[in-house]
Each structure stands twice: as C-alpha cells, then as structure tokens.
Amino acid sequence: MRALILGLVFLAVSVWAQPILIGFQGPLTGSWAVEGDWALKSVQIAVEIVNARGGILGRPIQLVVEDDGGTPKGGTLAAQKLIAAGVKFVVGTYGSMVCMPSSELYEEEGVLHINYGCTRVDLSARGFKYYFRTSGRDDSQARFFVEYVIPLFGAKRIAVMHDNTAYALGVAEDVLRFMKPLLDAGKLQLVYYDAIMPGERDYTPALTALRDANPDIWYYTGYYPEWALLLRQGKDLGLDWKKIKAVGSNACPISEAVKIAGIDAVMGAMITQEPLPAFLVEKYTLAKEFVTSYEAKYGPIHDSPWATYAADAIFTLAFAIEATKSLDPVVVARYLRSGAVVGEGITGPLSFSPEGDRLGVPYMLLICNEKGESALFDPAVHGHLVGM
Amino acid sequence: MRLLGKRPTWLYKQPVRWAFLAATIALLLSFPFWASRYWIDVGFYVGLYALLGLGLNVILGEVGLFNLGHAAFWALGAYTTAILNVRLGIPTLALLPLSALVAGGCAWLISSPIIHLRGDYLCIVTIALGEIVRLVLINNPAGLTGGPNGVIGIARPVFLGHVIRTPLDFYFLVWAMVALCAFALRQLQRSRIGRAWNYIREDEIAAEAMGVDVRSLKLLAFVLGAALAGLAGNIFAAKMRMVSPDSFTFMESCLMFCIVLLGGMGSIPGTILGAALVVLFPEIFRPVAQYRLLFFGLALAATMYFRPGGLWPRRRAVEFTAGRAARP
C-alpha cells in the first residue's frame, strides 16, 4: 500500500511537475569569467524566484548550464551541447563575437535565444526569428554620452579612447557618429581619438598624448582592467580628473576598478551605465525581491548590468510563456516580437522590437564617490569631485 | 619512467597495423551515425586541430623548429577565405587551395630571414610573429579585415551541388582533409626529404656536412606546415561563417604545440591522438565547469611526466640498402 502511494506520488510529480529546461550559456572560464559567474548566480536567483511563485504554467524551471569560455569556438560547442540536451529556450551569452556563431545554431534549430551581454548593433540586423536581447545596443550608450553627458558638463574639447575590441570600437565609432553634426557645426572639438592595446602594463605614452591634447572630457570605451590602469597611471602622471572629466563606458564596473587602482585614483571618475540593481530597487518591486534574495545567498550584489539583464531574460521567458500558455518557441517568439510589454522585470518594462532589440533601455551616469562606491551622479552631491 | 613497459613486438606486425588502421577508419566513419550533434561537432574540432597539429608536426616534429606562432598561419588562411568570399563572392570551397597558398606564401616571406635562427631564438621570433599577425588583423589594414569586429557573412561551402552546413557535413569535410594530408605526409616521411628533415632535427651540423641543403629544407617544412594551417583556416572560416581576431590568440598556438608534444614529435598518428586529447579533455570535464581548465592542465603535466616522448612516439625505421642481409 505504501509502495502504491509512493508510486502514485511519483507519477503525479513526474506528470505535473516535469521541469521546463532553460539553457544558460556564459563565460564561466576565460578572461570574462567574473561576468559569467555573476550572470549564472543572477540567473539562478531569477529561477528560484519564478519557481517559488509556482514556476511557469505550474512547472518548475530547471537550468542547464554550459560554459563557452568566452571564445567563438567555445560558443558553438556550448550551443551544440544545449541543443543536444533538448533545450528550447536559451539565455546567453557575454561578448558579441561569441554570440554570433552560437546564435546562428540556435536560429537553425529553432531555439529561442535571449542574449544578455552583447551590444553589437548588427546582431539584430540578421533577420533572425528567434533572437532577442534584454540589453541595449552600443549606439544607445553613445547617444546617451553625446546628448546627455557632454552638455551636462558643458564640455567642448572631447577625447575618445578605445581598446580596439569589437565592443569598444563600436561604442567609440557611434560616439563619433552622433557627435558629427556638432563637430561639423563647430560646437564641439575632437582633440583626441586613438586606441590602446589591451593587456599591456604601461599606458604612460597614451596618457601623455591625452594630457597634451588637453580635453575637457575623456571618454574611455573599453574594459575595466585597462581603464583602472589608465586611471592609476594618469593620476601618477599628474592628470587632474577635476579638469579632465574621466568617463568610462559600461564595461568598467567601478568596484573592479577600485580593486585594481585604489580609491584615490578612481574617485571622481564616472561611467555611463545601464541601470544597476542597487539603483533599481527603489523603482521596481521585482528588483527589490531579486536583490534581497541575491544578497541573502551570495553576499553583496554585483554591479554588473549584464548579469541583471541575464536574470531579466529568465523573467522575460517566464512572463511570455505564461502569457501565451505555450512552450513552442515559435509562438513565444511571435509574441515577444509583437512589441507588447510582457511584464515588469528588474530593469523595468520588458518589451522588444520586431528585430528582437530591447525597447527603451535607460542609461545613467555613475560616479565613484569618496568611499570608492558607485553612486548615481548628482551635481549637488558630487559636483566638487569633478570640479563643477 | 616507463608506464607501459616495453612495447610488445607483435604491435608492429604488418597485419596488426593494417587491422588497427581499418578499425580506426571504421570508427571515424561510423561515429557520426551513433553520436549526437554535439559529439559530431566535437569530432569536427578534433579533426580541425589534427589538421593544425599535422601542419605544426612538419615544422616542429620533423625538423625540430620551435614554432609558437602557428595560429598566425591559421588566421591567414581563415582571413583569406573570409575576405575573398565576402568581397568577391568566390565560392568558399574554391578558396581552399588558395588559402593554403597564401598562408604558405606568407610563411615563405616571413621565415626566409629568420630561418637560420635556432632553438629558443626562433621560438621567440615566432611568438612575436603570431602576435604581429593578430594585431595587424585588429588594426584593420585598408579596411579589409574589419578590425576587431572581424568579417562576417561567409557563404557556406558547396561541394558538387551539396551545401555543406550541418555538423555531419563539416565532420566529413575535415576528416577527409585529415586523411588526405596524413597519407601525403606519411609518404613524405619515407622520402629523401623526410629523412633529411629528421637528419636536420637530430644534428644540423652533421646534416650540412653531409651535403643536406639545410636552409631550403627548413624553409620547405615551414611553408608546408603553414599551408596546412591555411587549409584548416579555410574550413574554420566556413564552419564559423565569421572570423575575428579573438579566435587566433597565443593560447591557440600553445595548444597546437601541446598537440605535437603530447602525441610525439614527428608521429602522424600521435599528432591526431594529441589533437583528440586537447579537444576532448576540456569537453569531458564540462561538469566541473570552472575547474575544467585546471584538470586539463593537470592532465597535460601528468602526460609529460609519465611519457616525456609523447603518447604515441614515432618508431625509428631501420632501413638497409639492397644486397645486404638485414640484421636487427
């Protein structure tokens, strides 16, 4: 009798609560392992939240995790592994050139693919049916820098520096594109535009050239290890961040820069950034729940927007599957492309353009305050740090 | 320390060797029909790295030239294919020989002035070479390479009206290439050139004294090895449908170096085995995610410790001129 009951319970569980498989592809090893780790943790928290609310269509989500090592080749193998595991929905990955060949495989196999950390513009221009991203694009950040940050400081002499990686060059070129009318009209002046070599130890030559160009504002579009070194060596060289406003792009988390370069070198430096969870909690209820659960399990919340977008990709899937009552990627993809707001995620309303781009990604300007923390830039509070 | 003790002589009997070869070919041919898509793709990468390893084996294994910049020639082949296909619309498969030719030609140009360097000195120059090629690609000369973004939208190769697109197609394409190259290289090993290469590896001065044209033979090895890497580059570009400098890092050159050392210098089956291990190890250790490269490193170190000559070292052939009794 007991065996029969157990058997029935087992049967009931297997019928009713058969988990929905969702794949996660990210760089758990390699040069971007930190981002991969944060993203995986965030995705796991998002899955826990959804499961605690009763799952999707009454079924729990089960994650299938694959590491792509942050290389294009690793990306294809991870994608094949997920496809072979029978996954129909995938969240991933970080880095546009890693994403490109993997997303092609997902498209061919009809796997709905939500990207969280690739901002290259033409990723969504390939006419794919199953490709979406919860993050913004390179040019949305550039537009923010040109249309908001430059007028905020009344800067006239602009310096742009990148590190020649796909992402950094993309942002830098978009900044030039958006500045072009202003440059042509003589309202702005581009005094410095050059690339540095990532992975080097000494950037003094580039910084000397930057100092000689005497810009009002210096925009570095690249990754945090180099930015931290630039700030440190710039400080040692006598560059004054009150005179030259140092602005980094969104791959320069302030906490990491402080770890490498120290508070004194990074203080007063700013970054253009997608909204971080720490600043979202006041606005969105889901963000509050997410941050609380994350901090209870893993300690202080990371300040990477990409990991947050990865969590939002899970919520997008949960909302969209629930709304369509379908586990068919074709149906879910069609619904997502309609432009409807599928729900309110951690980073605000989740809706997508017919190309799969996230609609309306807001940006913000963060500053490293006296304590070495990132804070939302407020001229009244932080003005003295940047000589306003 | 010898882990396996003395090798039994029956392993080298001709029928046993043929049977072993037949079994390997049967395994490779039947593999895709019982393996999943994922494992077929892993099989493809084993073939690709085998091709790269075979190329480096000519340079490093046969002649003993330390080359830690082999990824540069791979990149040249891949970019030749990508640029000519995307700009001029030349079919990808038709670019296969051209990619090999460009990589080989560049190898000739680049290695001519440095070929007299020995050991570590050559090694350092090839490291620099690998980095220079990668940086040139990043710097987007004449707007050709697309800089760090690379070149995207490479057409799928078409073979006799059949579009090569699935993992299965690519698996057969790459292994057909490996088989062809392995056969040709084996013939070369047994030729005058092959023996002269080995002579140079063992004692360069003695070889020169005996009238072996050391410089030309070294150059030939370099060009041939680079051409094979160019071939692999073409297939890689066709498979990924995009090329970017991130794929051709110094780490890749190191992996190829490992393949040849792991397998056994100058050993063709050893190189293929080495490629299989280098690709398979990180895949097998996927369940331990973050630590898989640690295990990979440990496995490499252990192999080098227990079998310093490689896993499948080349057996030295004893040959005699006609008319003399063969005494072992």
Image (cartoon, coloured by chain):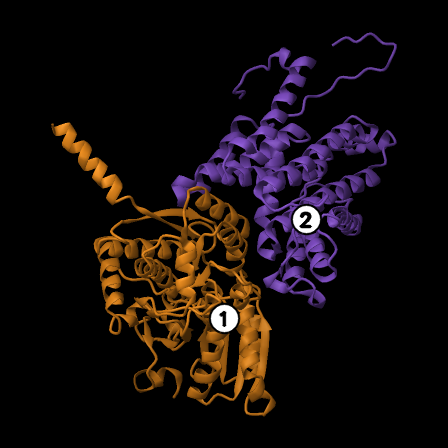
State which quadrant residue A351 falls in: bottom left
Disc marking residue A138: 1
Residue drawn at x 29%, y 57% is A46
Q: Is residue A26 left or right of residue B114?
A: left
> Which of labels 1 and 2 is toward the front?
2
Seen from the viewer's position, the closer of residues A349 and A3 is A3
* Secondary structure under the numbered disc 1 in the rendered image: helix
Residue B159 locus on image (x, y percent): 71, 44
- The answer to whether one can see residue A92 in this image is no
Residue A84 locus on image (x, y percent): 45, 42
Residue A61 locus on image (x, y percent): 30, 50
Residue drawn at x 26%, y 56% is A50
Residue drawn at x 33%, y 77% is A376
Residue A91 locus on image (x, y percent): 40, 55
Q: Please determine whether, in this image, residue A309 is positioned above or below residue B17.
A: below
Q: Is disc 1 in contact with disc 2, using a CB cutoff of under 8 Å?
A: no
Quadrant (top left, top right, bottom left, bottom right) of the C terminus of chain B: top right
**Chain letter for the part of the structure drawn in purple:** B
Residue drawn at x 25%, y 57% is A49
Q: Please determine whether, in this image, residue B287 is positioned above or below residue A123.
A: above
Q: Residues within 10 Å of mark 2 (few under 14, many from 20)?
A: many
State which quadrant residue A134 falls in: bottom left
* Secondary structure under the numbered disc 2 in the rendered image: loop
Q: Residue farthest to the left?
A: A1
- Measured in 3D between alpha carbons, the distance from the residue under mark 1 to the one under mark 2, in whole angstroms, is 32 Å
- Label 2 marks a residue whose chain is B
| Mark 2, residue position | B157
Query: In the rendered structure, which amino acid carries the disc numbered 2?
Result: Pro
Chain A visual colour: orange
- The answer to whether one can see residue B227 in this image is yes
Q: Residues within 10 Å of mark 1 (few under 14, many from 20)?
A: many
Q: Please determine whether, in this image, residue A49 is positioned above or below residue B3.
A: below
